[in-house]
Amino acid sequence: MDLQPINLNGIANDRPLLIAGPCSAETEEQTLCTAKQLADRGVKIYRAGIWKPRTKPGGFEGVGAEGLQWLKRVKAETGMYVSTEVATAKHVREALSNDIDLLWIGARTSANPFAVQEIADALEGVDIPVLIKNPVNPDLDLWIGAIERIYNAGIRRIGAIHRGFSSFDKKIYRNLPHWHIPMELRRRLPNLPIICDPSHIGGRRELIAPISQQAMDLGFDGLIVESHCNPDKAWSDAAQQVTPDVLEYIISTLVVRDEKQSTESLAQLRRQIDEHDEKLLETLVARMRVSEEIGKYKKEHNIAILQTERYDEILQKQAAKAAPLGLSEDFIKTIFVAIHEESVRHQLEIMK
């Protein structure tokens, strides 16, 4: 993809690009109050939800097009750029007619190719930055598909927003980060800016700082953070919003790592990684050869390929070794599940 920087006049390309504002524009007073506090603290791009797709009916679903007039006031009175989420072609047309500077597509919308295509058709011939959140489910191809649809509409200033993935497991995060997915997105689309949404990943304001730092450590280009002048009274997602003062403190404490600097010491360590990777591949090849021998034996003796008890024994035994070795149990299980699937594939080929 021939992508261009998000580029908004007067905003430096330094990391992190910062977009901040309330989850929802609730009232004109709240919208202006939050914007002025953020502008006083150096924030250049203001975000506020106008249309809010809620999980269940009956909740606050946004003020609608009326709120676009409030964003125009923000723009006029603070000089900030303004942004909002769009989910339909009608949203796009109303946002553009009210001089919104940046649009984003939400997670529920990016999961629906029909909805994304409708938005893409409405953007034909328009030059505006568009950010695309990951779909609610961890499907990288679906995310890339949404990006490609917007690109095919002629939009070149495109960015991705990583907001985590829905899960039944809510012990720590509201949405599981699955950092490997945006990292693979970067490998496939190296020129695509990726922005982290720590508010939606964490779901709690105390997690915004550590998630933001992790995003910087992983080389993300920016942050989109929910900030409200009185977050405890917010009409939506109150627990994950911070005051402009707290946001300023979080940003001031971030350590932004150099993305490209390399030294001879680092090069030597990377060479060691390469050597270990070669050994891993050699070990995996040797293991697959043994699996093939087992497959031949099963074929000769009419034994089913999948032996559930043996598979479970391997998983449990290896997972139990994880903690003493300084590895996570989930990591070990993921590796051995993948190894087992490849072993089964080799044995299926023999069975044929």
Image (cartoon, rainbow, N blue to C red):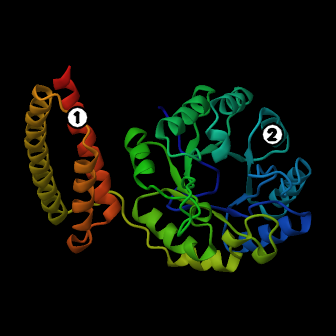
**Who's the residue at 71% across and 32% down the image?**
119
Residue named by callout 1: 305
Res. 18 visible in picture:
no
Q: Nearer the viewer, residue 329 or 306?
A: 306
Q: In the drawing, does residue 92 fall left or right of residue 17?
A: right
Q: Nearer the viewer, residue 77 or 114?
A: 114
Q: Give me the residue at 51% from left, 78% from top.
A: 253
- Where does the image place residue 100, in percent across and percent down from the top left? 77, 47
Q: Nearer the viewer, mark 1 or mark 2?
A: 1
Cα distance, mark 1 to mark 2? 54 Å
Kind of residue at badge 2: His
Q: Dot 1: few (<14), some (14–19), or many (≥20) neighbours within 10 Å? A: some
Q: Amino acid at mark 1?
A: Ile
Helix, strand or loop at disc 1? loop
- Residue at the disc numbered 2: 91
153 over 159 or under it: above or below: above
Question: Is 342 situated above or below 209?
Answer: above
Q: Residues within 10 Å of mark 2 (few under 14, many from 20)?
A: many
Where in the figure is residue 165, as x and y percent of width and height? 54, 52
Picture residue at 43% right of the left edge, 56% below the top: 179
- Asked if the residue at tag 2 contacts the one at tag 1, i.e. Cβ–Cβ closer than 8 Å, the answer is no
Residue at x 25% of width, y 48% of height: 311
